[in-house]
Image: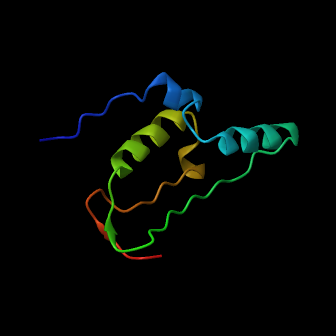
């Protein structure tokens, strides 16, 4: 059974469903003329099983489709992988 990749909803793609601080941060960066390199790390409070990374990879592929592959790196563990605390 393969993963069926679907396009995220318009609300996800527009950022409307995200937390307001993401929109505010984007506005501040735009007004300052900044286009920074972004790194995101997620830490678990306790031992857990990672779920949803395939959705995140799909979304990044859609929004980053116009990026230069030499300037783009997505490095992640897989769905179902055990992750440790912190």
User: For the point 61% across and 58% down, which residue is it?
Assistant: 39
Q: How many marks?
A: 0
Is residue 33 found left or right of 57 in the rendered image?
A: right
Q: Position of residue 28 (x, y in %)?
A: 82, 42
- Nearer the observer, 70 or 35: 35
Q: Quadrant of residue 26?
A: top right
Is residue 45 found left or right of 79 in the rendered image?
A: right
Q: Quadrant of residue 20?
A: top right
Vertically, is 42 above or below 7?
A: below
Q: Position of residue 8 (x, y in %)?
A: 42, 30
Q: Residue furthest bottom?
A: 85
Vertically, is 11 above or below 25?
A: above
Image quadrant in which the N terminus is located: top left
Q: Residue furthest left?
A: 1
Is residue 43 found left or right of 30 in the rendered image?
A: left
- Nearer the observer, 12 or 2: 12
User: For the point 45% across and 71% down, which residue is it?
Assistant: 45
Q: Quadrant of residue 83?
A: bottom left
Q: Position of residue 74 (x, y in %)?
A: 48, 54
User: For the point 69% across and 45% down, which residue is it?
Assistant: 21
Vertically, is 73 above or below 85?
A: above
User: For the point 53% across and 46% down, which residue is it?
Assistant: 69
Q: Position of residue 61 (x, y in %)?
A: 46, 39
């Amino acid at each position: 059974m393969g993963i069926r990749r679907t396009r995220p909803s318009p609300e996800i793609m527009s950022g409307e469903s995200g937390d307001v601080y993401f929109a505010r941060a984007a506005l501040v960066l735009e007004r300052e003329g900044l286009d920074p390199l972004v790194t995101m790390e997620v830490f678990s409070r306790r031992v857990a099983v990672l779920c949803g990374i395939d959705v995140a990879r799909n979304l990044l592929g859609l929004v980053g489709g116009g990026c230069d592959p030499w300037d783009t790196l997505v490095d992640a563990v897989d769905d179902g992988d055990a992750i440790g605390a912190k």
